[in-house]
Image (cartoon, rainbow, N blue to C red):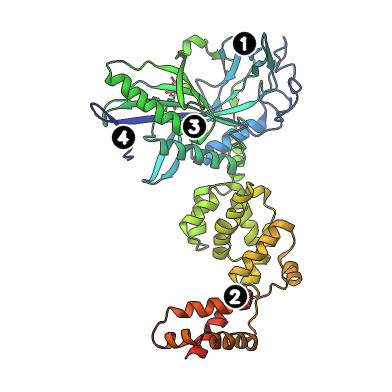
Amino acid sequence: MSSYRIQGATGEWEVVIGLEVHAQITSNAKLFSGASTAFGSEPNTNVSLIDAAMPGMLPVPNAECVKQAVRTGLAIDAQIHRWSRFDRKNYFYADLPQGYQISQLYHPIVGEGSLTVETDEGEKVIGVERIHIEQDAGKLMHDQHPTMSYVDLNRCGVALMEIVSKPDMRSPAEAGAYMKKLRAILRYVGSCDGNMEQGSMRADVNVSVRKPGAEFGTRTETKNVNSVRFIQQVVEYEARRQVDVIEEGGTIVQETRLFDPDKGVTRSMRSKEDAHDYRYFPDPDLLPLVLTEDFVEECKASLPELPDAKRQRYVEALGITPYNADVITSDVETARWFEALLDAGAEAKAGANWLTSELFGALNRLGKDIGQSPVSPEQAAQLLGLVADGTLSGSLAKQVFEIMLETGDDPARIVEEKGLKQTSDTGAIEAVISEILSANADKVDQYKGGKEALFGFFVGQTMKAMAGKANPQVVNELLKKALA
Ligand code: ADP
Ligand code: MG
């Protein structure tokens, strides 16, 4: 149970949240036509006669899109409906030449499922009501010319999954965690690229408030929210606003709202339309969608290891800390990079530590994500190998890594060229130690008189004199002997 509460004049309030997430299905072609879905194409270049709703054109379902929706359903342990059907949602708008959107209202392809989220308050299972398949609409542009509006139909007919959660979330943190987890699962499955900036994933955020334990209140729906942070802001803003309205004697009306990210507020857009306003009816151009058992089995067999299972395996079989396992499995690209690192011979725990601290630190500084890492998993495995076999100390490895980031060179070559090899040559180290001890005779006396903290000073001086290249373990042993 979440302990998130909104403080009002009449006491504490609880927020109730349900998300309807639109996710663009990864597919080269649209849901009912062969037109391309490439992002960023010239306006109106990816439009078939079907997408433009020319008379007499008939839609043909894209099997790849159906498969991706089924795989997504299986990934959240949902019921797969072997019989589903497409309905027309009728409305007029300039970005929708058909005059209706093909969707699935009455018989969605995927039924109830769930996913587990983790917040500071622990794990929680969030229910998913359904997943259905539908078409996207085109895009209107109003701001290029003061008196003109333009329409781009490239997105018209692109396949979307609408993933509808149950009203199970109780805090902004839970809503954010749900969106992140859902995004992670879709990216693992490969059914959506999860790119929220490009609009591949966006959420309608349903929010209501109630006194803890009371009946659900009336909800508002804030449309098309396209980042995790914005979702959380919408929840916070709406919950506060609704409590204030109710406590001032007003009532919440069920309505559609829009989020203004610059001001961090939501504004009323229109009162909520009911299903009958859309005159939904089964699309007579399309047969019911019937899936064979084999098709569903194939979808199941094609699923990769999912984030929860992977995290558990990393902890239990590889001995990685739960924190590192969490960080690495939270995105499929990171997990793939890590597994390539292991395949290239790196030891799991050292590899996980290095990836989450050194590599992530560097990528952060460079403003790159892991797919753009200047260092390959193979090169990283070589670097870790040089630490494991004693060629490099930890601090030398950091220096070599910096050079790798700049030059893209292999670590062994850098070590060779720059002479960065760590030395365990006891003769050389002993010579340096004896110089340092005689130059600091006073400190040696203090050390021998009981001031043991000075040991670190001698280590530091020795390392400095050897330009960081002495094996620290050997330095420690030899110093202890010399000071005994
Ligand atoms: P509709 O049929 O009007 O679209 P749904 O029952 O499909 O309504 O719910 C739409 C979304 O709103 C779902 O994500 C659901 O979890 C959420 N929701 C429903 N009731 C509430 C409520 N009282 N407070 C917050 N969210 C809600
Ligand atoms: Mg709905």
Viewer-nearest of discs 1 and 2: 2
Q: Earlier in the sequence, mark 2 or mark 4?
A: 4
Q: Amino acid at mark 4?
A: Arg
Q: Which residue is located at x 44 percent, y 43 percent?
A: 116
Residue 141 position, x and y percent, is: 65, 17
- The secondary structure type at the circle numbered 1 is loop
In depth, the one of 484 and 141 nearer the eye is: 484
Ligand 1 near label 2 (Cβ, under 8 Å)?
no
Residue 389's image quarter? bottom right
Q: Indicate the secondary structure of the residue bearing disc 4.
A: loop
Q: CA distance from mark 3 to mark 4?
A: 19 Å
Q: Indicate yes or no: mark 3 CB to ligand 1 under 8 Å.
A: no
Q: Are marks 2 and 4 in contact (CB under 8 Å)?
A: no
Label 1 vs 4, first from the N-terminus:
4
> What is the crowding at mark 3: few (fewer than 14 residues within 10 Å), some, or many (at least 20)?
some
Inspect the image, locate mark 2, and give the three-letter code of the amino acid beneath it.
Answer: Lys
Q: Residues within 10 Å of mark 2 (few under 14, many from 20)?
A: few
User: At label 1, which amino acid type do we have?
Assistant: Gly
Q: Whole-Å distance between the Cαs marked 1 and 2?
A: 76 Å
Disc 2: which residue: 464
Q: Nearer the viewer, residue 213 or 63?
A: 213
What residue is pinned by disc 1? Answer: 99
The first of marks 3 and 4 along the sequence is 4
Q: Ligand 1 appears in which quadrant?
A: top left
- Mark 3–mark 1 distance (CA, rounded to whole Å): 31 Å
Which residue, given by chain and number where applicable, does mark 3 sit on? 230
